Amino acid sequence: MTNPEWVIDTNVLISAALSACGAPARLVQLVLERGSLVFSQPTFGELKTRLYRPKFDTYISLELREAVLHDLSAAARWVEIGESGRYCRDRSDDMFIETARVAQAGVLVSGDQDLLQAPAITGLRILNPQQALAEALA
């Protein structure tokens, strides 16, 4: 793992919570074992809000959701972000880039095309889960 601090987008964290078999779950496991997950209040707030959506009720119990949120929160390094800069097409995704920028994390992991196609930002690579997993295993 070349950079010990990682920002991971909500969609990847939810995928990891729902299925222990895929690249997102393997990546989150490696980040928690060998590196550091980074959150800001806005990024964690989005995770919490989305993870509690009723559409996930048949896939993950409320108790497991609470445990996932507790464990991720406890394991993470937290940063304070101010007003996010304007980085990508979807303004709501800018908080992930701002969190990575403030934390000086070298990698942001996302499956969101708005983030994956964001203009280059010095010192930050935005990778999909498969790319990030390959890097984490290298």
Image (tube, rainbow, N blue to C red):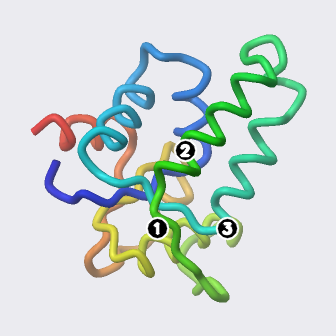
Secondary structure under badge 1? Answer: loop
Q: Nearer the viewer, mark 3 or mark 1?
A: 3
Q: What's the residue at 29%, 43% (across, down)?
A: 132
Could you say which disc has been placed on residue 118 in the image?
1
- Counting residues from the N terminus, which is met first, the one under dot 2 or under dot 1? 2
- Find disc 2 in the rendering and name its residue: 72
Q: Residues within 10 Å of mark 2 (few under 14, many from 20)?
A: some
- Find disc 3 in the rendering and name its residue: 41
Horizontal side, residue 94 vs residue 34: left or right: right
- Counting residues from the N terminus, which is met first, the one under dot 3 or under dot 2? 3
Horizontal side, residue 26 vs residue 64: left or right: left
Asked if residue 126 is positioned above or below residue 19 in the image, the reply reads: below
x, y percentage for residue 6?
A: 36, 56
Q: Residue furthest right?
A: 54
Q: Residues within 10 Å of mark 3 (few under 14, many from 20)?
A: some
- Counting residues from the N terminus, which is met first, the one under dot 3 or under dot 1? 3
Q: Quadrant of residue 80?
A: bottom right
Closest to the observer, 130 or 117: 130
x, y percentage for residue 85?
A: 58, 86
The reply to whether residue 30 is visible in this rendering is yes
Q: Quadrant of residue 55?
A: top right
Q: What residue type is disc 2 on?
A: Leu
Q: What's the residue at 52%, 67% (across, down)?
A: 78
Quadrant that contains the C terminus? top left
Q: Nearer the viewer, mark 2 or mark 1?
A: 2
Asked if residue 48 is positioned above or below residue 20 in the image, the reply reads: below
